Image (cartoon, rainbow, N blue to C red):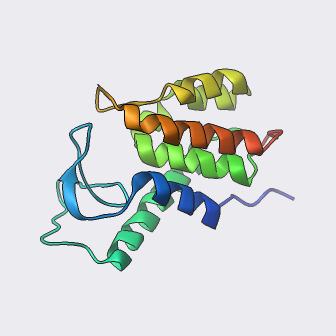
Amino acid sequence: MAQQPLTISLAGIELIKKYQGLNLEQYQDESGLWVIGYGHMIACYENFAGPLTPETAEALLILDIQRCQCLLQQCLEISLNQPQYDALVSLALSCGNEAFYQSAILKHINARQFDEALAEWEKAIVLNGRKINSLTPQRQAECALFLQGGEVGTR
């Protein structure tokens, strides 16, 4: 019987919330991107006139997480357990789907080269061409969560 695709756990969502923080007003982040809510990157077609409600911020986060989960379903060639999956969703959400898809981290994970993946992961603190030192604790937490998962299976 095929393994059902994972979905992010409550612990994974809490990790994302902790490191993204909640901002009900739009602002420009350290990499120069306009964001709102729990790190939601504002697309050119979106207009947030005034502050969000916490409920709207939560809804945007869930939509962003769903996009990341769709990407993981398409690009992961191995099975993960829950902590590993949660860590990858957090990384993909933080980096952006395109950057994650093209990352050496994903390539190493699919090749089962986990030490190499984690070494790259800890260095993934450049967004939009700028080094963001404040990402270091988040990357360390994501790596620690991934390591909690233990062995990784094959799909």
Q: Pick the residue in front: 114 or 44.
A: 114
**Which residue sits at x=74%, y=61%?**
4
Measured as percent of width and height from the top left, residue 79 is found at 75, 45
Screen quadrant of the C terminus: top right
User: Above or below — where is 52 with respect to 101?
Assistant: below
Screen quadrant of the N terminus: bottom right
**Which residue sits at x=48%, y=57%?**
18
Left of 60 or right of it: where is 6? right
**Which residue sits at x=76%, y=44%?**
148
Q: Pick the residue in front: 135 or 155.
A: 135
User: Above or below — where is 30 with respect to 63?
Assistant: above
**Which residue sits at x=49%, y=61%?**
66
Measured as percent of width and height from the top left, residue 65 is found at 48, 59
Does the rendering let one see residue 9?
no
Measured as percent of width and height from the top left, residue 121 is found at 55, 30
Left of 72 or right of it: where is 30? left
Q: Pick the residue in front: 82 or 135.
A: 135
Q: Which residue lies furthest to the right in this view?
A: 1
